[in-house]
Amino acid sequence: MKTSTLLDAWAPLLDAMRQAAWIVDGRSLQVRHANDAAAGLLGVPRLQLLGKDAATLIATPEDLAHWDDVRAGHAGSLHSDTVLVDATGRLVPVTRSIRSLVNDGTHPHLLVSVEDRSEAFRQQEASDSLVAELQATLESTGDGILVTDMAGRIRGFNRRFAQMWGMPEDLLLAHQDTAVFDWMRRSVVDPEVYQRRVDAIQEATLLQATERITLLSGQELERVTQPQSSRGRPCGRVWAFRDLTELVQAGRRIETLSTTDALTGLYNRHEIGQRLDEALRQARRDGGTLALLVLDLDRFKHINDSLGHEMGDRVLCESAARLKTCLRQGDLVARIGGDQFALLVHGADHCGAEASARRVLNTLSQPCSMDGLQFTLTCSVGVALFPSDGAEVDLLLRHAETAMQRAKIGGRACFRFHQQRLDADLRQRMRMDHAMRQALASQRFRLKYQPQVDLHTGAVVGAEALIRWRDPELGEVSPGEFIPVAEDTGFIIDIGDWVLTQAVRQAAAWRAGGLVMPVSINVSALQFQQADFVERVGGVLREHGLPPHLLELELTETILVVDADEALGRLGQLSALGVQLAIDDFGTGYSSLSYLKRFPIEKLKIDRSFVQGLPAEGSDAGIVRAIIEMSRALGLRVIAEGWKPKPSAASCWTPAAISSKAFSMHRPSTP
């Protein structure tokens, strides 16, 4: 068949093909015919393809070798995936096929057909990328993932799944599904329950489930499973496993911390309150009794200060261990404060509570030995009983703590039961404290001035400022009632500052009116111990322009001997300031001649208990006479407080005396 006839026969077929195709002359290896698809694929006009060397259209080593074989007379076929370079230089992935059309031995022709695989290649790349991204996502998640088909066969997994179950990854890669599922079943705490649940999930194609699994290793896993669908139809199931071990352990630690004391491991205050509430409900229901003991280690602060907080913590732990040995079955012990513990004793009446308290005191008082140091612990115990002392948690705790404070005041190393009367006294003291603070703010306090009279001349030589208080509800309140409360609460500092200011202002007013009258005030121990006390006194004197020698401060003996060195320094500063200093209630405290010599004291004030019976009471007369002689030897003046001398007795006493009659001073005037 002639070449032209051959081309005429094949040309319509090539033009009708959707694939790119061209016919190559086997002798010249030139293109004799090409279809539009070939022109489009190669990016060359169809007519320009005619006469092209076939080896230039697809010039891979494989194609070049094939055309060399054809040129040598070996016109075989070729079919493979390859690439071509179009007119723009773009690489195009194709599947190329070369076959002989006619080979009569003299004039062979070959058909080259090329399928453009660009779109398929893009889809494959997209698919591969999607699979890679999916696998990367699976590997990056903290959950273990297992994917199965409808028959339960494994279709995918990530490394986290293998790690979580402690499973060799080779077992999964080898597609040994039965071995994998058996490994999982043998790894859980309850294999039978686990397997029944897995079978039930597999049977329910559309079931979604979330469950907790505990492994033999102690791990806590959360298993979430849901069906996998394709085109709206179930095609498998995804199993996700999340390791909750740390979360569960953290929850348990939080629960433990919320109910127990971190140092001793005992129940904390909140938890003992909860347990006490439960015990009270049961006792009310059953008509039972119980006792609550609150104890505080005596002088525990000394241990912390002298031995350090680390040793203090060890002492607390030792105390907790000892208290545990004091418990009967069902009793509870808790640490409710720094060095404070509570014991809940079930079914205990007064006798049972006393026995428990004595057992605690005896156990804690056993000698301690730590780091070669020997010492003894003691504690103070307060006891409150149900139902006699209260039926609520807060009430019993408060009553037991109040009783414990009474035990401390009573000398420590002992126990006290709650007493209703003393509780009422505490409430009264609270009301008194509140009323005092309101009185100072509302200017209900006032000062009266008691004159100091010279027995020789009868002249008033000084005045002592005495605080008085009339309350709208309480009426006239004696200083003997409210001063102890003020000292206990610390409010005595505010009251003392007010008295100092008012007395100095009054003395300055008298002086301005032509009357030079020294004024004396009482100073509490707490007020005297304030670091700025001397500066405060000097500031008030300067503010009102009163010469310092017209102010006398009366101090108790106790103030001077508690910390003699500090007191001496402060008294020296006051003396340098120019104020007068006196000892009040002399003879009732820790009288000592040594501090009378050391301290810059100008006057002794004999307590009224020694002078009220004069001159009839012989023993009092002897004491007063001795004080006067001692004062004379030391160069001190003497004041007899509260003595109203008879005219016949006046000549027997040379020191200054005090009239028992006080007078009010509401505005500046002469006494």
Image (cartoon, helix red, strand yellow):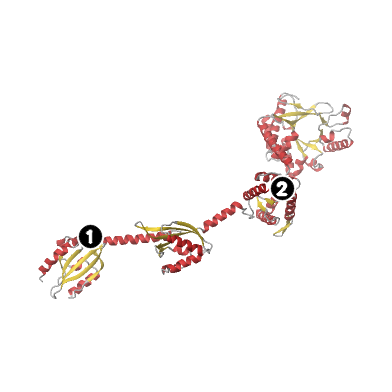
- Quadrant of image for the N terminus: bottom left
Q: Is residue 225 visible?
A: yes
Q: Is residue 469 above or below residue 119?
A: above
| Label drawn at residue 383 | 2
**Which is more toward the observer, 240 or 518?**
240
- Amino acid type for the residue under numbered disc 1: Thr
Q: Quadrant of residue 175?
A: bottom left
Q: Which circle's residue, 1 or 2, is located before the other in the chain?
A: 1
Q: Quadrant of residue 639?
A: top right
Count of numbered marks: 2
- Amino acid type for the residue under numbered disc 2: Val
Position in image of residue 413 (x %, y %): 75, 50
Q: Is residue 377 visible?
A: no
Which of labels 1 and 2 is toward the front?
2
In the displayed structure image, the side of residue 628 where residue 372 appears, left or right? left
Dot 1 alpha-carbon crowd within 10 angstroms: few under 14, some 14 to 19, many 20 or more:
few
In the displayed structure image, the side of residue 442 where residue 355 appears, left or right? right
Position in image of residue 82 (x %, y %): 26, 67
**Which is more toward the observer, 208 or 13?**
208
Q: Residue at x 76, y 46 (%)?
A: 410
Which residue is identified by label 1?
A: 88
Q: Secondary structure at mark 1?
A: loop
In the displayed structure image, the side of residue 471 where residue 18 appears, left or right? left
Dot 2 alpha-carbon crowd within 10 angstroms: few under 14, some 14 to 19, many 20 or more:
many
